[in-house]
Amino acid sequence: MNIIRRAISIFLIVVVMGGVVYIDQRQTEVSEGASRGIVSMAGFPHSIKSNRISSSWFCPGAAAGDGLDSASVFISNPSDTAITAAVSFLSNSPMESQTVEVPARNHSVVDVLRGRTVGVIVPVVEIIGSVGTVEQQLVYAAGDVTSQCVSQTSSTWYFADGFTTQGSSQRLVLTNPYPESAVVNVAYVTKEGKRSPTGFQGLILGSRTSRSLSLAEFGATDESSIALEVEATTGQIIASRMQHYLGGGRLGYSTTIGIPVALNEWWFAAGRTGPQVSERLVVFNPSASLAQVNVSFFGEGITNGTIIDENASAAAPSATVDIPAGSVLLINTDDLADLPKGEHAMVVSSIGKVPVVVEHVLSQITGGSSFTAITNGVPAALATQEWRIPSGLSNGARNALSLVNTTAQDGTYTVSAVGPGGVVDLPQLIDVPIGAAARISLDVPAGVNDGEVVIRSTVPLVVQRRTYRGHGLVGFGIVGALPVISK
């Protein structure tokens, strides 16, 4: 009898959560005006400070066929009471689900591959209430990967950076978490222009399924620059990108969800220039109009931000860079003579009303090997005074946190960790000053546990972190922290 009751309870949880997601999709489709802007931001990684019936987390997925050692979703619960989550696993097979209870001030790790050795599996997490946060983690010999999950689907997705040079591979994963089919068109842009292969048009995504597309199957091979544009003409979806870098100046593995909408301002907190470092800002203009952007840098030795022209050998006080309609431009920051070597933050601003999509690509040769880290920009609208890191920080890691003050006002910040006793401020990281337009790198204090980390400040910040690649590999990954906003 207890088994029957448990089965009924699990079934009801899954049905209720599925209904909430379906209703949320319907509400999204009719949003207009200011509310539509809020919905657009909801497609980016973030957490909402509000009382909701449930919260959804859509993750980028894992490719079992790539030879991963393991894949999991990390569900964090910083509250004083246990929370319940339903985890669904979407693939080209019938959907599977399980429920998980996450203890108070603790976390649960859920296996994604579930014994599968081929195909792509995409996890979707539904949490009763709005307290928990979710990240995806991959363990892989080419470098462990931590990826952010998002809380809303979209009818459009963009990827500025793509790479298939010297045997490197890239796949696009399309996921439909809803009970109705979706119809999707995909186009890609290279140096030769925009292409819309017939096999990428009118793709039908069945209910609660995912589909993996290899760019090599459609002629996008040996390309050093590939932007992707995904449009669901019916329904809403999640689009993610999986890249394995094997040459051409890149090495490693990357998995990320796309960018749902082009915007006018993008922030990056974890930039770097120096010997053996190649840093690029990849800017994609998906519109039918010319876009113009400038790039400002912030950090030690940079007092007021520096506008950079990608064709210039030195800093230009008011230079702009043209991005033709429907094209991609790679801006090299390491070739700029007047940019001090070392750590810095950057903001890419679009002049006028033509928005763009921007990603940051950092490659470095070190210790006889090399690595590549890819990260999406943080929209200016998501610069906020509270940030969370669901899976925490590695104990004693150096330069693990990068913070940039996006305002012209001085402020302070405090770093806290969630543990058995609740949220505890970390010694010597309480009310730390951060100047106007300043950037700070933080080491992780010894003794920090593996729980969620919280950063609170008196001024809006953008926060990104570095993650270990594991397996004795050199370098790091770059992942955004999770902004907490009020709705």
Image: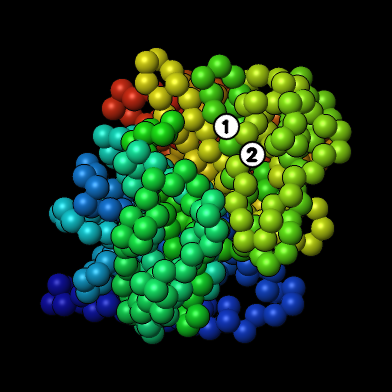
Sequence-wise first label, 2 or 1: 1
Write down the residue under mark 2: 331
Q: Quadrant of residue 480?
A: top right
Which residue corresponds to the image point at 47% horizontal and 83% vertical from the top-left? 234
* Label number found at residue 218: none
Where the C terminus falls, by quadrant? bottom right
Vertical side of 265 occupied by 25: above or below? below
State the residue at coordinates (41%, 69%).
Answer: 197
On screen, 221 above or below 419?
below
Q: Quadrant of residue 163?
A: top left
Q: Which residue is mark 1?
A: 279
Question: Is residue 364 placed above or below 181 in the rendered structure?
Answer: above
Q: Amino acid at mark 1?
A: Glu
The residue most toward the front is 192
Picture coordinates of residue 382, whole percent (x, y): 67, 53
Q: CA distance from mark 2 to mark 1?
A: 8 Å
Whole-percent x, y for residue 148 in the image: 47, 50
Secondary structure found at label 2: strand
SS label for mark 1: strand
76, 252: nearer the viewer: 252
Residue at 32 percent across and 67 percent down: it is 211
The location of residue 170, given as percent across then percent down, is 37, 51
Which residue is at 37% across, 21% downward?
A: 369
Q: Residues within 10 Å of mark 1 (few under 14, many from 20)?
A: many
Other residues around mark 2 within 10 Å, as few (<14) / some (14–19) / many (≥20): some
Locate residue 1, reporting x and y percent. 13, 77
